[in-house]
Amino acid sequence: MKYLLWAKRLLAGCLALLLFYQFWLFGWVLWWNWIDPDTTRFMEIRLEELRLLQPQAQLKKQWIPYERISTNLKRAIIASEDARFVDHEGFDWDGIQHALEKNQKKGRIVAGGSTISQQLAKNLFLTPSRTPWRKLEEGVITLMLEATWSKRRILEVYLNVIEWGSGVFGAEAAARHYYGIAAAQLSAEQAARLAGMVPSPRFYDRNRNAPGLARKTAIILARMPSADLP
C-alpha cells in the first residue's frame, strides 16, 4: 500500500508538471500573438551548432512586417508547403494521408504532410527530432496557435522565423543572402526558388544549382496563381 501511495503521488506530480508546461507554452503563444518573437528554439539549436565551429558566429535575421513581404513569396510558400492553409484548422488530413501513402511506397520518410501551422509550432518551441512525443507536442501547440492567432499572423511569423540557409532565418535575411534585395522586391521566380529550398535549406545553400531545385521551382511557379492568401 505504501508503494502504491508513492506511485500515485509521483504520477500526480508528473501530471502537474506536464500541465504547468502546457500553460507555460500557452503563455508564450499568447504573448507572441502581439509581440514579435526575437528568437526560436530552432534558432537556438542552429546557433549552438555554428558556434561549435566558430565561437563568434551570429545568425542572419531581420524581422519585417507582413506588408513588407512580397506577395510572390507568400503565394510561393503556400503553394509549396500548404495549399489548404486558409481553409484547415491546423491539420491537413488529406495531406497527411497522402504523405503516409507516399512514405509506405518509398519505404522511407520522403514526405511529412505538416501544415504551415505545424511547422511553425515546431520551429518556435521544439527540436528537429521525429519522436512520438515531439509530434504530440507539436499537435498541441498547433491547436493553441490556430485557436488564438489569425491565419495572417501565423503566416507572418512563419515567414520571419523559418530557416533558409546556414544561419539564415526569415524572408528578409533570405532575400538579401541569395539575391541582395529586400523581401518586398522578390520576383515570382525568386520567390518560387526560395520556397523550394524550405525543406532542405542548408543543403540548397551549399548546392544552389541543384537540378532538383530547378524542377521544384517550376512546379511552384505553376501553382502560385491558385494559392489563397489570408
Image: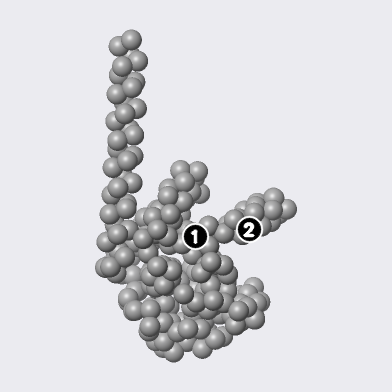
Image-based side of 10 in relation to 122, left or right: left
Locate residue 213, reporting x and y percent.
61, 75
| Depicted 13 relative to depicted 153: above or below | above
Check residue 51 in the rendering and tell me which mark sits there, or answer none. none
Callout 1 secondary element: loop
Q: CA distance from mark 2 to mark 1?
A: 13 Å
| Depicted 170 relative to depicted 182: above or below | above
Q: Quadrant of residue 182?
A: bottom left
Locate residue 100, reporting x and y percent.
65, 52
Of labels 2 and 1, the one closer to you = 1
Q: Residue at x 44, y 56 (%)?
A: 142
| Depicted 194 relative to depicted 47: above or below | below
Identify the residue under disc 1.
89
Locate residue 198, reporting x and y percent.
51, 69
- Which quadrant, please, contains the N terminus? top left
**Quick one: 210 or 190, which is closer to the camera?**
190
Q: Quadrant of residue 164?
A: bottom left
Q: Dot 2, crowdedness within 10 Å: few (<14), some or many (≥20)? A: few
Image-based side of 209 in relation to 142, left or right: right
Locate residue 58, reporting x and y percent.
31, 69
Q: Residue at x 41, y 72 (%)?
A: 152
Q: Amino acid at mark 1?
A: Glu
Q: Residue at x 31, y 65 (%)?
A: 33
**Can residue 140 be seen from the camera position used here?**
yes
**Can residue 193 be seen from the camera position used here?**
no
Q: Which label's residue is closer to the chain start, 2 or 1?
A: 1
Q: Dot 1, crowdedness within 10 Å: few (<14), some or many (≥20)? A: some
Q: Residue at x 50, y 77 (%)?
A: 229
Callout 2 secondary element: helix
Q: Amino acid at mark 2?
A: Asp
**Quick one: 147 or 49, which is closer to the camera?**
147
Identify the residue under disc 2.
94
